[in-house]
Image: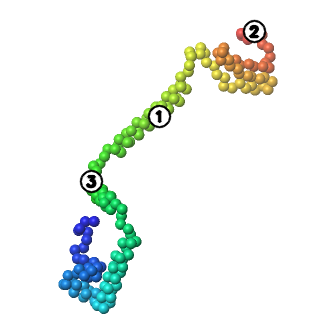
């Protein structure tokens, strides 16, 4: 907090603490006692509260030392606190960085590299056919007949590089009729 965050005049609670301790100047003490009467606090009640607060303070000072032993290394503790306070209060504002843009560029390049590896590993091998291309290419799409007595079976031999359509159940046709 900055000094400008605090009010210029002490609050009633701050004046009350100074009055109990006896550190309130005479002029302010008279104004404080008048404020107490305005708030409905009689001088006798205020004095009784003052005596009780002083009594409680004395008891706390006497017994607090026993309940709270001193820190084993107070300088270390204080130094840690000061470092933390300085780190929190003296953070310079950073200029805008191009790091998000760089990260985006590197991410894009990594994605392109991964896509290139996938293309080279999956697509290119399927396009490349080992060995010389065949002399002919045959593909049988449908080997069905309308006559149930005729059967058609397609066979392919990789070694011979040949495809045969075997048709069984046809009537014999002499070679001379087949040429016509």
Q: Which residue is located at x 75 percent, y 9 percent? A: 175
Is disc 1 placed on a helix, strand or loop? helix
* Mark 2 lies on residue: 175
User: As rendered, which of 104 and 70 lies closer to the eye?
Assistant: 70
Of all residues, the one furthest to the left in this rendering is 27
- The residue sitting at 35% across, 41% down in the picture is 102
For label 2, count other residues whose C-alpha is less than 10 Å away and answer few (under 14), some (14-19) or many (20+): few
Mark 3 / mark 1, whichever is N-terminal: 3
Tell me the residue that label 3 is attached to.
Answer: 92
Left or right of 166? Residue 19 is left
Q: Earlier in the sequence, mark 3 or mark 2?
A: 3
- Note whether residue 29 is visible: yes
From the viewer's perspective, is 120 left or right of 155?
left
Q: Nearer the viewer, mark 2 or mark 1?
A: 1
The residue identified by callout 1 is 115
Question: x, y percentage for residue 100?
Answer: 35, 45
> Is disc 3 surrounded by few (<14), some (14 to 19) or many (20+) residues within 10 Å?
few
């Amino acid at each position: 907090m900055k000094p400008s965050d605090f009010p210029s005049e002490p609050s009633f609670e701050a004046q009350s603490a100074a009055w109990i301790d006896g550190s309130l100047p005479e002029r302010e003490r008279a104004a404080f006692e008048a404020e107490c009467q305005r708030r409905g606090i009689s001088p006798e009640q205020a004095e009784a509260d003052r005596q009780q607060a002083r009594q409680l303070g004395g008891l706390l000072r006497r017994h607090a030392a026993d309940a709270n032993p001193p820190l084993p290394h107070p300088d270390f503790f204080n130094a840690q606190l000061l470092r933390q306070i300085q780190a929190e209060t003296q953070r310079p504002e950073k200029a805008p960085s191009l790091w998000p843009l760089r990260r985006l560029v590197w991410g894009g390049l990594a994605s392109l590299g991964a896509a290139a590896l996938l293309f080279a590993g999956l697509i290119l091998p399927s396009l490349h056919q080992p060995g010389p291309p065949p002399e002919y290419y045959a593909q049988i799409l449908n080997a069905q007949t309308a006559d149930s007595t005729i059967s058609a079976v397609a066979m392919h031999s990789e070694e011979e590089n040949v495809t045969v359509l075997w048709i069984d159940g046809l009537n014999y046709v002499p070679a001379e009729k087949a040429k016509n």
